[in-house]
Image: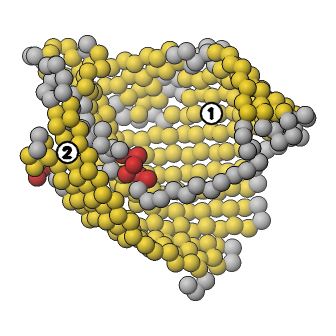
Amino acid sequence: LWKGTLAFGTEETFTDRRDRFVQSGFSADADDHLRQQYYSAFADYTATLGRFSLQAGLRYEHQRTRYYEAGVFNPDQSPSYNDLLPSATVSYNHDDWSIALSYRLMKYSPSYQMLSSAVSYMSKYTYSNGNPLLVPQKHNMVTLDGGWKWVNFSIWYDYVLDMYTSYFKPYDDEGHPGVMLHTIASIPYTNTYGASIDLTPRFGVYQPHLTANVRWYDADVTSVGIPYFKNRPQFSFRLDNSFTLPKQWFVNLCATYSTRATQSNTISQPAGQVDLRVTKALLKDNSLRIGFTANDIFNTGRYRFTAYGDRTYHDFRQTGNSRYIQLSVTYTFNATKSKYKGTGAGQAEKQRL
């Protein structure tokens, strides 16, 4: 159409899901039945005008939910939504330069596990459950992307309405004193900011790949009874050193590191590790590969964060078996052949299931 391409269509998704949860007395049984229907129509136009490319799209989405608890219809947990989701992008390309500015309104519905009212046993002092009252969250995403040869960068801002947050609160001070409930809620708004730079130069057989990111956000968690904490951005770095050597030898040394950060009601501590991988390809079609891996060489693969909740404090420390060495032998059948497998509609709904 004119100097571009117009695409349009419809998408329909129908889901019928039932969860039954029966246990031995530490909480109530649950019987949740959800019927959900999506009807959507969309149109998208893309045009190229010299060095500029333009894209604009609009999607209309109708979502209807019917929620039954133990076979009884619950109108308070059976909402219907009608949403218009626009998107637009302007990009410029010339020689080794490229830059693009885009806006998109995205909508995400909670997974069905997040909507479950069942209370699960995690440990003697921790239970967990979902929240049938969760509503879809909406992301207003503005992104500026650019690149020159082996230098690429991205700057983005995301204003989120009804963002999901998991937190802890007392389960039952009288019947189960000392037990925390890990649950989830929608918070009114969240501002998320971020930037990244990606460097991929090449020097003969050696190609380093350096990625640096910064991310920070502020969220209104006071709505769920959590004191507000100041935000401190988190910086993360990744350096991939790849050596493509003669006779099908390949060596990769990768290091990652992230700094301490305060993100709303959580505090994460510094973390990082170093991994080594060596592979050798054999046979004419490279279908046979022998590999050696040394993971977490310096045994620093630890993870720790602190979460402040509703009258609760949770300190999580994880030291896993991330340090190991591994020898592998892999043979790929039909290594030179490839087949295209398309993906149909409803992928997001299947992920929720």
- The amino acid sitting under disc 2 is His
Q: Residue at x 38, y 22 (%)?
A: 306
Q: Residues within 10 Å of mark 1 (few under 14, many from 20)?
A: some
Q: Position of residue 12 (x, y in %)?
A: 35, 64
Above or below, 174 relative to 82: above
Instruction: Determine the secondary structure under disc 1.
Output: strand
* Number of marks in picture: 2
- The amino acid sitting under disc 1 is Phe
Name the one closer to the observer, 350 or 62: 350
Res 224 quadrant in image: top left
Above or below, 43 relative to 224: below
| Residue 237 seen in render | yes
Is 96 positioned to the left or the right of 142 in the image?
Answer: right
Q: Residues within 10 Å of mark 2 (few under 14, many from 20)?
A: many
| Residue matched to label 2 | 33
Q: Nearer the viewer, mark 1 or mark 2?
A: 2
Label 1, label 2: how far apart the Cα atoms are: 44 Å
Q: Position of residue 101 (x, y in %)?
A: 55, 63
Name the one closer to the observer, 307 or 245: 245
Instruction: Determine the secondary structure under disc 2.
Output: strand
What color scheme is it?
secondary structure
| Residue 276 seen in render | no
Is 335 positioned to the left or the right of 145 in the image?
Answer: right
Q: Residue at x 65, y 20 (%)?
A: 295
Instruction: Tell me if label 1 and label 2 are in contact, CB under 8 Å.
Output: no
Q: Residue furthest front?
A: 333
Name the one closer to the observer, 203 or 27: 27
Q: Position of residue 1 (x, y in %)?
A: 55, 84
| Residue matched to label 1 | 237
Q: Quadrant of the C terminus?
A: top left
